[in-house]
Amino acid sequence: MRRAMPTAGLICAFLICGAASRGCTADNFADPAAWEAFDAGNTGGLQAQGYFGAAFDGRYVYYAPCRTAVFHGVVLRYDTTGSFQAPGSWAAYDAGHTDGLRTVGYGGAVYQAPYVYFVPYHNGVSFSGIALRYRLSR
């Protein structure tokens, strides 16, 4: 008996250059036509590149900011109700100085309602213990 599979899933474990991709999770995994890509590297006028891990809240995928040449705090968000290749489905926010702290260089993200938590990794000088969280709208 064949199980029902979602038609598409996001591939979002590690995103360096700003280009995100998604592919089908069903039987056509090896079919090039099942894959899409979008260059989110300049979303909202911010350098949205260099991500490590992501979290999904049921609608949005939040990419955890990590680094390119420098560690950064630009959180990238994809709205799964929109077209994957539409710029309007993507948003970015520079959370790099939240509450007066150097909130950069995260190694993943976790969703636990009503928050997305970003896992501390490195701030560009040393390993970091500065946790960051985002409260979803009520």
Image: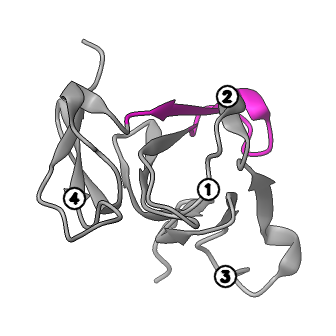
The residue labelled by disc 4 is 119
> Does residue 118 sit above or below 16 in this rendering?
above
Of the numbered discs 2 and 4, the one sitting upstream in the chain is 2
Residue 113 lies in what quarter of the image?
top left
Tell whether position 85 is magenta: yes
x%, y% of residue 61?
Answer: 46, 46
Q: Which residues are magenta?
A: 78-95
Residue 86 lies in what quarter of the image?
top right
Of the numbered discs 3 and 4, the one sitting upstream in the chain is 3
Q: Specify few, some or many for label 4: CA neighbours under 10 Å numbering under 14, 14-19, or 20 or more.
A: many
What is the number of the mark on residue 27? 3
85 on left or right of 128: right
x%, y% of residue 59?
Answer: 45, 36
* For the residues bearing labels 3 and 4, Cβ distance under 8 angstroms: no
Give the colour scheme shown. Answer: one colour
The amino acid sitting under disc 1 is Gln
Of residue 58 and residue 122, the one placed in the foreground of this image is: 122
What is the number of the mark on residue 49? 1
Of the numbered discs 1 and 3, the one sitting upstream in the chain is 3
